[in-house]
Amino acid sequence: MVTERAEVRPQTACETVAPSRSVLPPWLIWGGMIGLVQIFAIATVQPLGVSTAYPQFVGWLVDKIVPGFAESQPYLQKIGAKIGWEVMLVLGLALGAALSSVLPGGRNTAACDLPNVFRSSWGRGLAAFVGGFLILFGARLAGGCTSGHMLSGIAQLALSGFLFGAAAFATGVLTASLLLKRANGS
């Protein structure tokens, strides 16, 4: 009896899409654009950061429902309960992410082999919410957010920004590797 053997190739955690026809890689183009926005922000307002936007927006919203609330809170007196440029930046980030997923080419990336908890949209949403809440809570507890510390710190050539950026990326790579290794049953 002859049996046919199918070629078995190792399963990769995440397939990559074919390179674009652009001379420059997309990460370099978009990274350069973020750099230009950061330079503009530092020159005109202040370095970019997003964690302050959330308590500002919630304070503004609660103050509309319960007038005088923001004036009674020392933290909101310090940061302001308003819709300022930080809140608009966060709304723009969310809008940009939504647009990138619905515009042509936005969903062309191959699916990653994810841990079971992330396979359902509810699981991903819950994990993203809990993770985002913990990061935001830590950022407010520490007096600043990770994106602001990393992007703005590096843009200002602060040693702490470079060290934190290296530590954040190393931790992210390690965490992703462990999660994907577990998902692949290795």
Image (cartoon, rainbow, N blue to C red):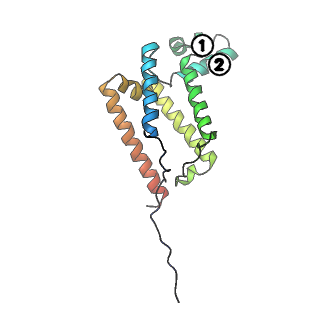
**Neighbour tally class for label 2: few under 14, some 14-19, many 20 plus, Cα within 10 Å:** some
Q: Amino acid at mark 1?
A: Ala
Residue receiving disc 2: 62
The percent coordinates of residue 165 (x first, y second) are 36, 33
Q: Amino acid at mark 2?
A: Val
Mark 2–mark 1 contact, CB under 8 Å?
Answer: yes
Vertical comparison of 34 with 59: above or below: below
The percent coordinates of residue 14 (x first, y second) are 48, 53
Vertical comparison of 35 with 8: above or below: above
The percent coordinates of residue 162 (x first, y second) are 33, 30
**Neighbour tally class for label 1: few under 14, some 14-19, many 20 plus, Cα within 10 Å:** many
Task: Give the residue displayed 56% in from the left and 49% down from the top.
Answer: 118
Residue receiving disc 1: 70
Q: Quadrant of the C terminus?
A: bottom left
Q: SS for tag 1?
A: helix
The percent coordinates of residue 73 (x first, y second) are 56, 14
